Image (spheres, rainbow, N blue to C red):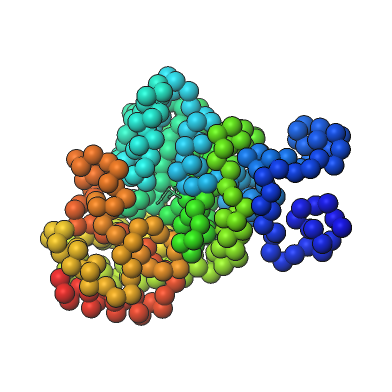
């Protein structure tokens, strides 16, 4: 019998085995030394590494055009690991308002630890030079952003970052590697909530950080230290999600585009945000840096106030009222009441989100069924 935990019966299984072991018997002291010296990809203890997790990392890295990738417990663990790995007290970090809400909470912790933070609106990204300081160590953005799908020019941000030797980190959760590869546009690192489109089925939480081999080593050190290693079962679910990722991403963005075009013409929708629309302020840059579509998420205002948005959501039959995104099901929520609850009330609306803004994540449903659902629910508003 093979001693490779991934090929326990000699022949390689079609599905990577779920190795649930916390610890491993050492073949010899020599093997132990080779593992600890990093000469072989051996396994000793789950917090260090796991063969099921490692296999998924190997599959994810090329999807982002990265040398390697670190998988961890959640998207927020991925963001936090990036901050902890590269920032120290006295460093300056530029964050965009238009990033996932829980990053605000992390920013409070970082400030307590002495990191100086500047917040920018994605609309101001062209003027980032004015915010750079000699101690700016990192620029962290999302494009398209959560929830208003604002687009920032990754290559332009990298050029700005270079002037102070700062790192550029892009959360690529909304775009997904199907449509956008930030590393090829100039980002140093890409992070993902793999809970979303990479996993794709609302049944696992995971995070990914993709970059160079050197970054892998640094981030691995952090993961091993703080214990954000993903469990093998979730890694196996993530591997399963990756098998259909391209098909799902293509369908999600086609559905999002069709819904955005329908909603853009609807009299009860005063504002729609989707970079796939010609009229969207981010369309030109999105066309430059995205391919094969513009992602599966859109945001729009319903009627005049939050009651209208609630009536609309309550009236939907197919599209499900729930947070999260990138899943097989189509999901809708009011960010002001859900994902942005983490923010102080004035901050929730200070960069364009309104109390009647809804975020819609297209699933892989038949397009005409989604349009029918939107149409009938809007009649009730
Ligand atoms: C863009 C983005 N980044 C990060 C996260 C955090 O991911 P997780 O919920 O897996 O921690 C989310 C969650 O919604 C997100 O939308």
How many tags in the picture?
Answer: 0
Res 171 seen here: yes
Of 213 and 113, nearer the camera is 113
The residue at 15%/64% (across/down) is 308
Q: Nearer the viewer, residue 65 or 159?
A: 65
In which quadrant is the C terminus drawn? bottom left
Horizontal and vertical percent position of residue 88: 48, 23
Give me the residue at 70% from left, 59% from top.
17
Q: Is residue 150 left or right of residue 300?
A: right
Whether 139 is drawn above or below 332: the answer is above
> Residue lying furthest left in this view?
304
Q: Nearer the viewer, residue 76 or 121?
A: 76
Of residues 14 and 349, the one drawn nearer to the viewer in this rendering: 14
Find residue 128 and report its horizontal and vertical position in percent.
36, 34
* 134 relative to 254, above or below: above
181 relative to 363 in the view: left or right:
right
Name the side, left or right, on which 369 lies relative to 18.
left
Task: Assign the N terminus to one quadrant of the image.
Answer: bottom right
Q: Is residue 87 above or below residue 55?
A: above
Q: Residue at the location (39% across, 57% down)?
A: 324
Q: Give x and y (percent) for residue 150.
A: 34, 50
Q: Quadrant of residue 302?
A: bottom left
């Amino acid at each position: 019998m093979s001693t490779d935990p991934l090929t326990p019966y000699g022949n390689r299984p079609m599905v990577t085995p779920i190795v649930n072991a916390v610890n491993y018997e050492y073949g010899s002291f020599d093997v132990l030394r080779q593992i600890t010296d990093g000469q072989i990809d051996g396994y000793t203890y789950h917090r260090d590494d796991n063969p099921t997790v490692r296999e998924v990392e190997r599959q994810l890295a090329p999807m982002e055009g990265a040398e390697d990738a670190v998988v961890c417990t959640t998207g927020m663990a991925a963001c936090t690991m990036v901050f902890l790995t590269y920032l120290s007290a006295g460093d300056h970090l530029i964050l965009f308002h238009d990033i996932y809400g829980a990053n605000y909470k992390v920013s409070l912790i970082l400030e307590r630890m002495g990191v100086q933070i500047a917040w920018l609106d994605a609309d101001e990204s062209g003027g980032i030079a004015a915010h750079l300081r000699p101690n700016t160590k990192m620029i962290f953005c999302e494009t398209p952003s959560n929830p208003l799908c604002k687009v920032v020019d990754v290559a332009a941000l990298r050029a700005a970052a270079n002037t102070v030797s700062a790192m550029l980190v892009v959360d690529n959760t909304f775009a997904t590697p199907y449509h956008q590869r930030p590393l090829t546009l100039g980002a140093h690192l890409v992070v993902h909530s793999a809970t979303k489109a990479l996993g794709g089925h609302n049944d696992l939480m995971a995070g990914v950080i993709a970059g160079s081999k050197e970054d892998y080593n640094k981030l691995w050190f952090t993961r091993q230290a703080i214990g954000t290693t993903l469990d093998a079962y979730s890694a196996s679910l993530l591997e399963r999600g990756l098998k259909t990722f391209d098909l799902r991403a293509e369908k999600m963005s086609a559905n999002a585009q069709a819904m955005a075009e329908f909603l853009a013409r609807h009299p009860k929708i005063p504002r729609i945000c989707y970079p796939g629309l010609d009229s969207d302020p981010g369309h030109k840059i999105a066309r430059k840096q995205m391919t094969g579509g513009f992602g599966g998420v859109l945001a729009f205002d319903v009627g005049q106030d939050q009651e209208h948005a609630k009536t609309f959501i309550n009236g939907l039959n197919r599209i499900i009222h729930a947070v999260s995104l990138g899943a097989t099901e189509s999901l809708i929520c009011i960010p002001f009441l859900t994902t942005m609850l983490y923010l102080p009330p004035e901050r929730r609306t200070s960069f364009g989100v309104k109390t009647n803004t809804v975020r819609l994540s297209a699933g892989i449903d038949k397009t005409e069924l989604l349009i029918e659902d939107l149409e009938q629910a809007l009649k009730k508003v």
